[in-house]
Image (cartoon, grey):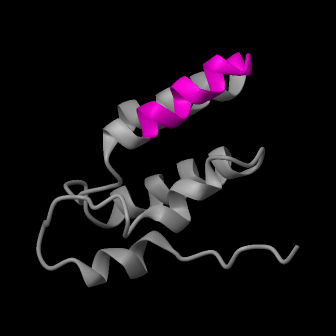
Amino acid sequence: MRPKKRIPIRRIRRKTPGHAPADTVAWAPILNQLWTSEGVTQVSQQLMEARRGDPKVPLFPEITVGIIGQDYLRVGETKAAIEVFIISLKT
C-alpha cells in the first residue's frame, strides 16, 4: 500500500477565501493523518505552523476531531484519544 500524499495546511487555507468555515471534506487528507500513530504529532505541528501565520485561521471542524478522539476511546487507545482531544481544544 502506497503512503498517502501529505497536503500542507497552508495549501488548503489558500483554497478557502478569507476566513471561510472549516469544511470536513477539504480537510480530509489532514484528518486522515489522525488515524496513524505518527499522524497526531504531525497534525499538531501543522496546526501550530498555521496558527503562527494567522491565529484566526479556520481549521478543521472541531466536531470531526472530537469524533476521531471518541473512536480512539471506544477501542481502548486512551493515550491517542487524549492527544486528539488536545488538538481539538487547540482548534
Please, is residue 61 above or below residue 24 in the view? above
Chain part drawn in magenta: 65-78
Residue projecting furthest to the right: 1
Figure quadrant of the C terminus = top left
Q: Main secondary structure of the magenta part?
A: helix
In the displayed structure, 50 sits above or below 86; it is below
Lateral position of residue 82 relative to residue 26, left or right: right
At x 62%, y 18%, the residue is 73
Q: Position of residue 67 (x, y in %)?
A: 45, 33
Q: Is residue 71 magenta?
A: yes
- State which quarter of the image contains the N terminus: bottom right
Quarter of the rendering containing residue 60: bottom left
* Count of residue discs: 0
What is the x, y in percent for residue 86?
Answer: 49, 29
The reply to whether residue 24 is in sight is: yes
x and y, in percent, of residue 5 in the image? 67, 79
- Above or below — where is 38 with respect to 26? above
Residue nearest the viewer, comparing 34 with 50? 34
Q: Residue at x 22, y 77 (%)?
A: 16
Answer with left or right where residue 61 lies relative to residue 30.
Answer: left
Residue 5 among those drawn in magenta: no
Q: Residue at x 24, y 60 (%)?
A: 57
The one nearer the camera, 85 or 77, is 77
- Name which quarter of the figure residue 2 lies in: bottom right
Residue 36: give x, y in percent of width and height: 74, 49
